Image: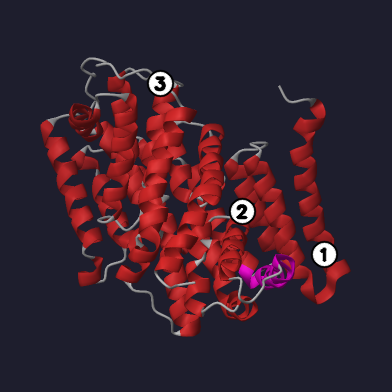
């Protein structure tokens, strides 16, 4: 049990951040917006990271403070709500509810148990492998999480891992982290990759190729990270061999017709996601259209009162705030100020290419801690030319180092897909933080050096 001092510390630090945001105009003059953005970010992230307050409360506090204090224009403060990523999250939550209600998750879990059910480690490895393979087809991590987490939950039930069991937690983490972290080696698989691509094209007329990105990142950040994740999850969340839990009672809408309708909708959604290069429809709008179909009352694919009682509005508000945070930090000038400080602190040495790449990866990781990973490219990409000059590296290499930070998120609040997985499964942030910190530190110590060797082999450094 935390003592009274430790329990009071997060609210005190959060209040200090709010106070800084309020008094900054009288102290810092023209650069006050940057300090205000920093104070509000501190107030929200401390509450979330320490679970001192509900996520939705911290998010509303951020929105209210940023709007009242005029830290950024309203369109920027509330930009998370009109981000495609936000609507992908909403769609993903609908998909997950439908997969459970219509019995699709149970059907797929039965098939997975027949293939991977020989041992707990095999179940974990199978779930991670499925997540990585699905990333080649579905260009949105939230959508993949929404499809995989219900399967992981049903698989855990069949294996005899009840709520609170380490095996259940391990399978959910395998589904969520396995389809989020290794796929950063696939260019269109995660939103931060695409934000970086768009920013690089806009600012520098620089284009990334699918094959070039895959060759540089996927062998280490994809394949080896997936293997490392399996090893860590088996050790962090040990469980006995799976057992057949018996036939599960079907849900209220678990009839063949509902199952067929849902399979048809999700199959069409997957096909449209996989062929976005052909028709040009954004994944978010495809997902939203599919969610609208699923919610159609006559189809009976979700509980009748799902929108009123089953949709986690608090999670959605929090994710919108995390998506807005990066935009507010950038608009307020905090990103530029941080860039100058980081360049000075990093002590880049032209010619020490491997060391400079490692430092750039650390910078990307630290920036990601300020909010969701979506904000990292918005902050660092405008600084890429300065960083290239300071390090002596090519602009392309400097931009590519952001992927090191993307794939090394350390806490759940940084990743909307992980937050969605926690919401779908009912697992708290503590186990997810343990897994993410362990994976992040292991990656920095083991995989990053291997990545530097691989980059050297390819002639990138």
Please tell me whether residue 117 is drawn above or below residue 44 in the rendered image: above
Counting from the top left corner in percent of width and height, residue 182 is at 39, 51
Distance from the alpha carbon under mark 3 to that under mark 1: 51 Å
Please tell me whether residue 297 is drawn above or below residue 204 in the rendered image: above
Confirm or deny contact between disc 2 and disc 1 (CB under 8 A).
Answer: no
Q: Secondary structure at mark 2?
A: loop
Residue 24's label in the rendered image is 1
For residue 130, what is the image quadrant?
top left
Q: Nearer the viewer, residue 271 or 442?
A: 442
Counting from the top left corner in percent of width and height, residue 438 is at 54, 39
Q: Secondary structure at mark 1?
A: helix
- Residue 161 is covered by the magenta coloring: no
Check disc 1: other Cα within 10 Å, few if <14, some if 14-19, many if 20+. many
Confirm or deny contact between disc 3 and disc 1 (CB under 8 A).
Answer: no
Residue sitting at x 55%, y 51%: 444
On screen, residue 456 versus residue 414, left or right, reads: left
List the residue tagged with mark 3.
239
The residue range painted magenta reads 330-346
Counting from the top left corner in percent of width and height, residue 402 is at 51, 64
Disc nearest the viewer among 2 and 1: 2
Q: Nearer the viewer, residue 266 or 380?
A: 380
For residue 157, what is the image quadrant?
top left
Check disc 2: other Cα within 10 Å, few if <14, some if 14-19, many if 20+. some
Q: Secondary structure at mark 3?
A: loop
First along the sequence among labels 2 and 1: 1
Disc nearest the viewer among 2 and 3: 3
In the current view of this chain or complex, which residue is farthest to the right? 27
**What colouring style does the render use?**
secondary structure
List the residue tagged with mark 2.
369
Disc nearest the viewer among 3 and 1: 3
| Quarter of the image with the N terminus in it | top right
């Amino acid at each position: 049990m935390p003592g009274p001092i430790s329990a009071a510390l997060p609210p005190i630090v959060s209040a200090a951040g709010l106070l800084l945001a309020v008094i900054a105009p009288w102290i810092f003059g023209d650069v006050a917006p940057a300090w205000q953005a920093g104070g509000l970010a501190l107030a929200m992230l401390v509450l979330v990271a320490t679970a001192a307050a509900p996520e939705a409360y911290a998010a509303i506090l951020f929105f209210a403070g940023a709007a009242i204090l005029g830290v950024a224009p309203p369109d920027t403060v509330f930009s998370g709500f009109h981000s495609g990523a936000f609507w992908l999250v909403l769609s993903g939550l609908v998909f997950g509810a439908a997969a459970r209600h219509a019995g699709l998750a149970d059907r797929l879990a039965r098939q997975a148990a027949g293939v991977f059910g020989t041992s707990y480690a095999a179940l974990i490895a199978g779930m991670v492998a499925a997540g990585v393979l699905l990333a080649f087809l579905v260009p949105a991590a939230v959508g993949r999480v929404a499809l995989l987490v219900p399967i992981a939950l049903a698989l855990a039930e069949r294996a005899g891992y009840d709520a609170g069991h380490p095996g259940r937690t391990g399978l959910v983490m395998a589904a969520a982290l396995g389809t989020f972290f290794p796929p950063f080696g696939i260019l269109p698989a995660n939103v931060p990759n695409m934000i970086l691509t768009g920013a690089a094209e806009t600012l520098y007329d620089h284009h990334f190729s699918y094959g070039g990105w895959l060759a540089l990142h996927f062998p280490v950040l994809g394949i080896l990270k997936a293997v490392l994740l399996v090893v860590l999850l088996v050790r962090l969340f040990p469980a006995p061999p799976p057992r057949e839990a018996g036939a599960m009672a079907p849900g209220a809408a678990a009839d063949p017709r509902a199952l067929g309708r849902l399979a048809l909708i999700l199959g069409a959604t997957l096909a449209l996601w996989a062929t976005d290069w052909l028709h040009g429809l954004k994944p978010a709008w495809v997902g939203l259209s599919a969610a609208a179909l699923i919610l159609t009352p006559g189809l009976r694919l979700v509980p009748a009162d799902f929108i009123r009682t089953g949709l986690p509005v608090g999670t959605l508000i929090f994710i919108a705030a995390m998506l807005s945070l990066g935009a507010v930090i950038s608009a307020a000038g905090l990103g530029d100020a941080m860039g100058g400080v980081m360049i000075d602190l990093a002590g880049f040495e032209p010619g020490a290419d491997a060391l400079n790449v490692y430092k750039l990866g650390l910078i990307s990781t630290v920036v990601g801690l300020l909010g969701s990973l979506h904000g990292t490219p918005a902050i660092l990409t405008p600084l890429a030319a300065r960083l290239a000059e300071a390090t002596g590296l090519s602009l392309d290499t400097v931009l590519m180092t952001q992927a090191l930070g993307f794939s090394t998120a350390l806490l759940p609040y940084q990743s909307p897909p992980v937050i969605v997985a926690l919401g779908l499964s009912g697992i708290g942030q503590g186990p997810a933080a343990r897994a993410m910190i362990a994976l992040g530190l292991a990656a920095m110590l083991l995989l990053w050096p291997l990545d530097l060797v691989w980059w050297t082999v390819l002639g990138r450094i």
